[in-house]
Image: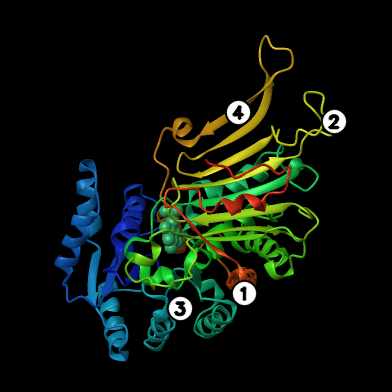
């Protein structure tokens, strides 16, 4: 295969390119992480030339003074090509330009930073112009979420794309998988022998996963109103975290070994429609003022908050509730996992019915304040038997004393290297839609609670916890 790579960003005039993709690529360049030389070609409709694209990027990307010389060096391999992705001629011309820029055989990465409606047409154009041919170098395609809007559309998109590409050429991105703390879930679970024996229904009472955001929908109302919290975050980021928390040890760290185990978790997720207990298991909310956001319908029924109680019907997790929650307009931005352990079988230190006392929990702080806390009770010194909650904590920043790499840096590097472990396979995407569709079918019959921005969402969300299962974590 070729010993250089051309990263082609389609839709390069968008925010993602300047905010995430170029900074991620540049960081890998500065840290000398590329396995071989990399060229970057921005492609968009805008009638820019190369110099204009370079100066726009340079203005928008923050670069430390000390890295200025490296930035110029990086920029010397950054190109631009104006292309109308909806015209067949556009692709022929694009192919010609890309070949000219490359000069010789290259591996190609096509990053589709474009509207999902254009995924199929764009891959079709790339395919027809020969750009996906792999006879002299690899050709990989990266697609952003959302991948489909339900199971049927995701299946159709998979089928169409896989007619033109092999699964090994298709990189479905979920940027949460590039976060260092999300990757650490496997290391934490399978490198440390002390937690794994506890990681099952015998010891775990309930697992909570929260993706909380303080931001409102901002200028994304048009997109968000047709997506909602369920399709924007729950179907992808939250279910991916759940799969990593709940999966069995993979046979190796190879892409398919990990993905085989993740997909089994998703297959075992009980569809919300099949939950038969009569407790609440879905709470939806919409923040006050959402209907006045730009692009949002005046009578919108879209949820900006969702909390779900669900189960994984397998041997390890039988009967353990998994509580998932995400929302916008909450008091703070935090993503975290809380694994709450059972009470001791016999209570020497408190009344046996004191089910509000839940001393043992493990909190995995995904972001911000990345770290891990282990909660337990200690006897207050000098007291009879007064119990006080205490915690052991590990903070990434304090411990490593260095910057945590951005998700996109790692993910782009993995595409260049051909490592698919942090990307979603077709069966994973379909399984997560299976569960999500079942949830969405129930939503019209579920009350949409209004909540104040900067509150923790509808009070009704507390009803998802059983009597002795604790309450929602706030960090
Ligand atoms: C995106 C969603 O996938 O993730 C956004 O579309 C959300 O609505 C964002 O704000 C959150 O990402 P992060 O990395 O800031 O937690």
Q: Secondary structure at mark 3?
A: loop
**Mark 4 or mark 2, whichever is nearer to me:** 2
Looking at the image, is 347 positioned above or below residue 429?
above
State the mark number for residue 346: 2
**Mark 2 or mark 3, whichever is nearer to me:** 2
Residue 370 in the image: state x and y as whole percent.
49, 40
Question: Which residue is the site of mark 4?
Answer: 391
**Mark 4 or mark 3, whichever is nearer to me:** 4
How would you rate the neighbour count of disc 3 (Cα within 10 Å): few for under 14, some for 14-19, many for 20 or more?
A: some
Q: Are marks 1 and 2 in contact (CB under 8 Å)?
A: no
Q: Residue at x 32, y 73 (%)?
A: 104
Q: Earlier in the sequence, mark 3 or mark 1?
A: 3
Q: Earlier in the sequence, mark 1 or mark 4?
A: 4
State the mark number for residue 211: none
Question: Is 442 on the left or on the right of 5, as rendered?
Answer: right
Q: Earlier in the sequence, mark 1 or mark 2?
A: 2
Q: Secondary structure at mark 1?
A: helix
- Quadrant assignment for ligand 1: bottom left
Quick check: is the Cβ at mark 3 less than 8 Å away from ligand 1? no
Q: CA distance from mark 4 to mark 3?
A: 53 Å
Question: Which residue is the site of mark 1?
Answer: 441
Q: Secondary structure at mark 4?
A: strand
Q: Earlier in the sequence, mark 4 or mark 3?
A: 3
């Amino acid at each position: 295969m070729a010993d250089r790579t051309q990263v082609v960003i389609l839709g390069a005039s968008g925010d993602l390119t300047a905010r995430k993709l170029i900074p991620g690529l540049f960081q890998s360049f500065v840290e000398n992480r590329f396995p071989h030389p990399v060229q970057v070609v921005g492609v968009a409709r805008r009638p820019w030339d190369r110099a204009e694209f370079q100066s726009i990027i340079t203005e928008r990307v923050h670069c430390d003074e000390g890295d200025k010389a490296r930035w110029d060096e990086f920029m010397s391999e950054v190109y631009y090509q104006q292309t109308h992705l909806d015209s067949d001629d556009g692709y022929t011309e694009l192919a010609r330009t890309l070949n000219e820029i490359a000069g010789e055989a290259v591996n190609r990465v096509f990053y589709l930073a474009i509207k999902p409606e254009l995924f199929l047409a764009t891959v079709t154009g790339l395919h027809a112009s020969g750009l996906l041919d792999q006879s002299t170098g690899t050709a990989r395609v990266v697609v952003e979420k959302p991948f489909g809007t339900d199971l049927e559309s995701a299946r159709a998109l998979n089928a169409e794309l896989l007619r033109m590409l092999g699964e090994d050429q298709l990189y479905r991105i979920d940027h949460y998988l590039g976060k260092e703390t999300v990757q650490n879930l496997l290391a934490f679970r399978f490198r440390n022998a002390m937690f794994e024996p506890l990681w099952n229904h015998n010891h775990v009472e309930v697992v909570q996963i929260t993706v909380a955001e303080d931001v409102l929908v901002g200028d994304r109302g048009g997109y968000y109103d047709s997506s909602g919290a369920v399709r924007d975050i729950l179907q992808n980021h939250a279910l991916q975290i759940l799969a990593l928390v709940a999966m069995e040890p993979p046979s190796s760290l190879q892409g398919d070994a990990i993905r085989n185990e993740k997909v089994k978790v998703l297959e075992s997720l009980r569809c919300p429609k099949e939950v038969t207990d009569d407790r609440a298991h879905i709470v939806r909310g919409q923040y006050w003022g959402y209907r006045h956001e730009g692009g949002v319908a005046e009578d919108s029924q879209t949820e900006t908050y969702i909390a779900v109680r669900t189960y994984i019907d397998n041997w390890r997790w039988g009967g353990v509730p998994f509580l998932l929650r995400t929302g916008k307009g909450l008091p703070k931005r935090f993503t975290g996992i809380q694994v709450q352990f059972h009470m001791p079988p016999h209570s020497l230190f408190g009344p046996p019915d004191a089910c509000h006392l839940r001393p043992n929990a493990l909190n995995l702080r995904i972001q911000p304040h990345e770290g891990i806390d282990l909660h337990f009770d200690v006897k207050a010194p000098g007291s009879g038997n007064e119990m006080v909650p205490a915690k052991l904590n590990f903070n990434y920043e304090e411990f490593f004393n260095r910057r945590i790499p951005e998700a996109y840096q790692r993910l782009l590097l993995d595409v260049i290297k051909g490592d698919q472990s942090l990307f979603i396979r077709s069966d994973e995407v379909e399984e997560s839609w299976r569960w999500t569709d079942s949830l969405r079918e129930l939503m019209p019959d579920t009350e949409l609670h209004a909540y104040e921005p900067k509150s923790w969402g509808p009070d009704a969300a507390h009803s998802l916890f059983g009597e002795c299962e604790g309450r929602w974590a706030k960090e």
